[in-house]
Image (cartoon, grey):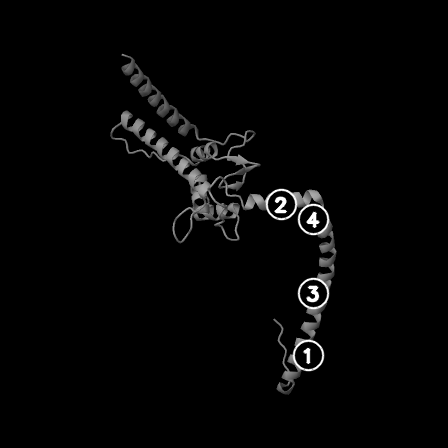
Amino acid sequence: MQEFTWNPDYTNFIRHAFVHNVMDNYGKQIYEWKQKWLINQEELRVHWDKDEKKATSVTNSANRKSDRGGKGMYKHNLGAQTIATLGDRLADENDGEPVDDFVLMKTVHTNKHTGEIYDGVVRDVFSLIKTQKEDEETRLSQLQTDLDATSTASTNLSRIRINEIVESSVLEKKGRLVGLGRRARSVPPSAPQPYVDPEVLDQLKDKYDSIAALEQKMADQEAG
């Protein structure tokens, strides 16, 4: 960094000249910005004076203030960040692994101070997903117990399976998933199949074969 020295007697004079120069340059910059703003302002006035734009504005305003069937207006809980940004941050905190949509939705809409979800629509959707997730985990646990009472295998659902439960439960409007915003489906129809270790596939096949055999045995017992 370059340093300047001068006679201390000139300090006030130099400070005054510096401040004057800064103010002059700043004023010129503001003037240039204002001229551009005035041009854009006139273009925006013409744009928003169109009947179709007025109608769109009225519709959007009504949607934002909608009572949503008695559930109340939408409550924003994210501050300045987006859902995508929050998802990236949660993944970074999870050793680079993306969190499932259930965790993401809960984090997005839970008030940090009270631990409550205040948005009525999201609260109902989250409750439905939570129930379906717990029911499936319970069924999986019961099947594992019936197969092997001493089994200590985890009954936690995979991230992909949890996302499937979320996507099957959440209403989609105009490309938006309620509670998760505008985001792509976790597994688009045209997406290539992810790589899976063959050994894992064999383990899954053995597991599902055992479950199928148990279900058939239970069905035979009920029929007999």
Q: Residue at x 39, y 24 (%)?
A: 205
User: Of the residues tagged 4 and 2, which is closer to the observer?
Assistant: 2
Residue type pointed to by label 1: Ala
Q: Quadrant of residue 106?
A: top left
Question: Circles 2 and 3: CB distance less than 8 Å?
Answer: no
Q: CA distance from mark 4 to mark 1?
A: 46 Å
**The one of 168 and 69 positioned closer to us in this rendering:** 69
Residue on which the image places disc 4: 48
Q: Secondary structure at mark 2?
A: helix
Which one is earlier in the sequence, the residue at label 2 or at label 3?
3
- Disc assigned to residue 166: none
Q: CA distance from mark 3 to mark 1?
A: 20 Å
User: Of the residues tagged 4 and 3, which is closer to the observer?
Assistant: 4
Q: CA distance from mark 4 to mark 2?
A: 11 Å
Question: Circles 4 and 1: CB distance less than 8 Å?
Answer: no
Q: Quadrant of residue 103?
A: top left
User: Of the residues tagged 3 and 1, which is closer to the observer?
Assistant: 3
